[in-house]
Image (tube, rainbow, N blue to C red):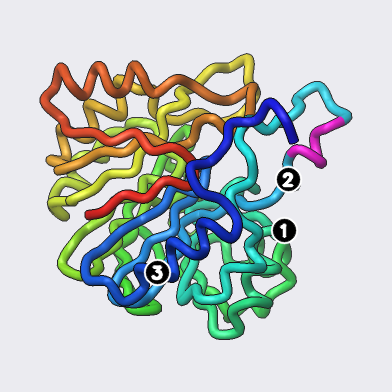
Amino acid sequence: MTGLIQPVLRGDALLAGVRALREAPGVRLWWLGQSGFLVQAGGRHLLIDPYLSDSLTKKYAATDKPHVRMTELVIDPAKLDFIAVATSSHNHTDHLDAETLGPLRAANPGLSFVIPEANRPFVAGRLGSPPEWPVGLNDGESAEVGGFRFHAVPAAHEQVDRDASGRCLYLGYVIETQGLRIYHSGDCMLYDGIVDSVAPFAVDLALLPINGSAPERRVAGNFNGREAAWLAREIGAKLAVPMHYDMFTFNTASPDEFVAEAGRLGVRTRVLRAGERLEL
């Protein structure tokens, strides 16, 4: 396809880069687009909220809310046959995509899957998976899965919604591996208590959406660039990386506001291109 943003690495070139570093010490990650990341640590691999298909573009093609793709697909999920665990922070398709997770499960028979416990029936229905398969968490809970430790914190998309049992429908995850802590907020807006929920983890890396909230988009919103930079400072993140942009033309933002505000606040940042690696 022409006219799309080209990833730094994609397809077989990305796979070769990942495999070449598999036994290397340290922790590294690759941005896969939208809110998706591939984390490599100790020879194990984690996929955070992967969206690796055109399912939303196809679904909305003939509607008044077209999801026009901006960035070339980074990798076919069927080729990722070395993944120990994947996550879904909530039920929206760009975080829980059957066209991504179906091939991923087929390629990784031992795959573990971390989700909000509140979403278990929905996940089983969308993926056609056994209801007991995922590892479900609620805010304040932790679990060791696939060689990574997950701590669940509330997320607000656009508010902190809970089911009838009081369990969060949207989560962020603080992920511990190799002595480092990575905070992936999921889709989230600022809410009372968010700093108190995350700051005690003393995160090394914060992965934060920056596309903001605009009613005319008719989709739930996220932090804007200024809010994401403020949150990174308030939780004491050593490094902050923006996400959730450059995927769909109707729901994106430039990272420039985030970078400028982070600079003003003294927050260290790194802007990744799709398919680009970050060493931690």
Picture residue at 70% right of the left edge, 60% below the top: 98
- Residue 221 pos. (x, y %): 50, 28
Dot 1: what SS? helix
- Asked whether the residues under the numbered discs 1 and 2 touch, taking CB atoms below 8 Å apart as contact, a structural biologist would say yes
Give the magenta range.
Answer: 57-61
- Residue 144 seen in render: no
Q: Give the residue type at disc 2.
A: Asp
Picture residue at 15% right of the left edge, 34% below the top: 234
**What mark, if any, has residue 54 been given in the picture?**
2
Q: Is residue 223 magenta?
A: no
- Residue 181 pos. (x, y %): 21, 58
Where 36 falls versus 216 (above or below)? below
Pointer 3: what residue?
20
Name the quadrant containing residue 24. bottom left
- Asked whether the residues under the numbered discs 3 and 1 touch, taking CB atoms below 8 Å apart as contact, a structural biologist would say no
- Residue 34 seen in render: yes
**What mark, if any, has residue 72 been given in the picture?**
none
Q: Nearer the viewer, mark 3 or mark 2?
A: 3
Between 29 and 21, the residue placed more toward the observer is 21
Instruction: Point out the tag, 1 or 2, that comes first from the N-terminus.
Output: 2
Instruction: Point out the tag, 3 or 1, that comes first from the N-terminus.
Output: 3
Looking at the magenta stretch, what is its main secondary structure? Answer: helix
